[in-house]
Amino acid sequence: MSTPSADSYYGQPVLKEPTWHSPEVPGYLFLGGLAGASSLLAAFAHASGDDELARASKAGAAVAIGLSGAALVKDLGRPARFLNMLRVFKVTSPMSVGSWLIASYGPAAAAAAASAVTGRLPRAGAAATAAAAALGAGVATYTAALICDTAVPAWHDGHREMPYVFAGSAATAAGGLGMLAVGPVAAAPAVRFAVLGAATELTARSMLLRRLGEGAGPYQAGRAGRLMEAGEVLTAAGLSGAMLAARSRTAAALSGMALLAASACTRFGIFEAGRGSARDPAATIGPQRERRRLSEAAAR
Amino acid sequence: MTATDVQITTRPDGMDTYPGQQPRMGFFTDTSVCIGCKACEVACKEWNGVPEDGLNLTGMSYDNTGSLNASTWRHVAFIEQIGRSSEPGESRWLMSSDVCKHCTEAACLDVCPTGALMRTEFGTVVVQDDICNGCGYCVTACPFGVIARRETDGGAHKCTLCYDRMGDGQTPACALACPTESIQYGPVDELRERAQRRVGELHDQGNDAARLYLDDPTDGIGGGGAFFLLLDEPEVYGLPPDPVVTTRDLPRMWRHVARAGAALAAGALAACLGWEGRNR
């Protein structure tokens, strides 16, 4: 009979590991960000007459949200009941808020794309573009609350920074898609969006890791660590390429792809880090013990 | 009774009650008298028709159940401690029947996007099996790793505190089967008083490590409808030492999400205006 350690029950996790599957859920975090941020870029490009970029971003947003919706339904334990999400609206459940966001954003993004691609119903298309942009800001960022409103230490304890990481990552992806989809001159706003996004994401990410302190381990170890690192390297490569983007179509497309991949790597890395921290009893117990020690010391 | 006659009183533990109605019901599990017989595990499975979850040998102790799960709603932990006290070579066995805590502030209930998880008239937290769509959010939100998804039907499952028995004035199966009254069922107020007396008795007998766990309405989950008397640190039993319901931080999360969304929109606008503004 083995002797249990005083620090946990035979090294077993305190928490249940998320049932969410990969690639569905991290894929959704990436695609939702790509879609929402693309709709914002599309709306402002539309308003300032950058039609080529607006059209490409609208089409990209519609495809991305379609794929992510399918991924979400597939991840349910009872996919046939997915519409049960829409029988209530609860602000205490980011997933409920997200369901309503996607249910309203999806059709708007699809209508905006359909109008832009076919050239029909321009007024309705413009209204759909505006609606998709407003809702898209929510679609791209609410997912941070979705994963942080859990007992998973690596997610929950980063809840102050995660929304900015997600917003930055979403802009990086949407900018990357624009660079990939349109010519170098038309892509100038996309390049700027990607640069702003990447800078925000990298800053917020380092703030998140600093706040977690010892709890940042799951972001640095194993698969999660490799993904997070790949995200950084790809971001750097994409940004360097973006400097040449105005001169070369090939450079623009390659950097666009690198930025899309960077955003995906970050989301998959964050997802894996959460799973890792849920599996590790020390990640749950350590910070709670410290919190209890501090509150007992304060009470004395 | 007309609508104006109904007075809702707010109790110190935050659970609203209606006059003349059912008080909040729960479990007090006094692990100091648990003998590890697992009658609670068996009675729970039998009454609730919970499917078997494998005849596995964990190889770590007499605990071959492992943990609470979609098909395990009572779990008896077994801990052998050798040489932990000041007496060299002295050993003891700790046994504890774990269960869903039926939190006052229940994360699973808060995050459930379908409304499948609900609060009953007894103050307990129950999954409505015909509504759950298996999204798994409750699994990720529970600070105790209690609720889980059953792979055979894709739905989330956990202890109901024998909702069907309670409605008929019956004692939940585990408490009824417990041969030592380690599992006690009753109104939470009464159980809390009983638990205070019991922990006082143990302290008087020199067992200073005895403590109550989740009995306090001011703790991170607003107190449990099921709470425990433990003889060691909670983490020894596989319980989190200071759980806090994740939704307490949700207002702050939404504020940051709103700011991040606004920043994203501002970024898109700035990108389209260009660094020097648009001079066309």
Image (cartoon, rainbow, N blue to C red):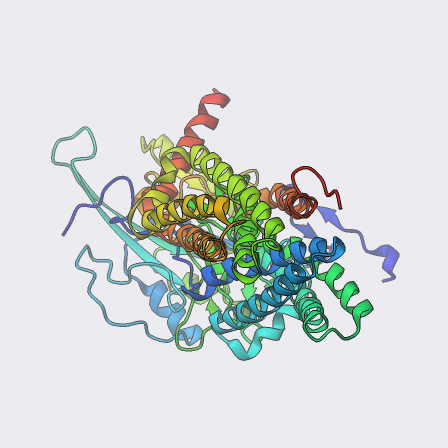
Q: In the visual, does A224 lie left or right of B89?
A: right
| Residue A29 placement, left or right of B179 | right
Image x and y of residue B5, in percent = 85, 56
Locate residue A168, reporting x and y percent: 55, 46
Q: Residue at x 67, y 60 (%)?
A: A54
Rendered position, B130 above or below A238: below
Left or right: where A46 falls relative to A71: right
Q: Residue furthest left?
A: B89
Q: Can residue A63 be seen in this view?
A: yes
Q: At 59% from the left edge and 54% from the top edge, which residue is drawn?
A: A187
Residue B82 drawn at (x, y percent): 16, 40
**Of all residues shown, which one is farthest toward the front?**
A247
Q: Is residue B190 visible?
A: no
Q: Is residue A21 above or below residue A196?
A: below
Image position, residue B38 (x, y; %): 30, 62
**Identity of the residue furthest to the top in this view:** A300
Q: Is residue B264 above or below residue B74?
A: above
Q: Quadrant of residue A272?
A: bottom left
Q: Residue furthest bottom?
A: A80
Q: Which of A21 and A257 is in front in this view?
A: A257
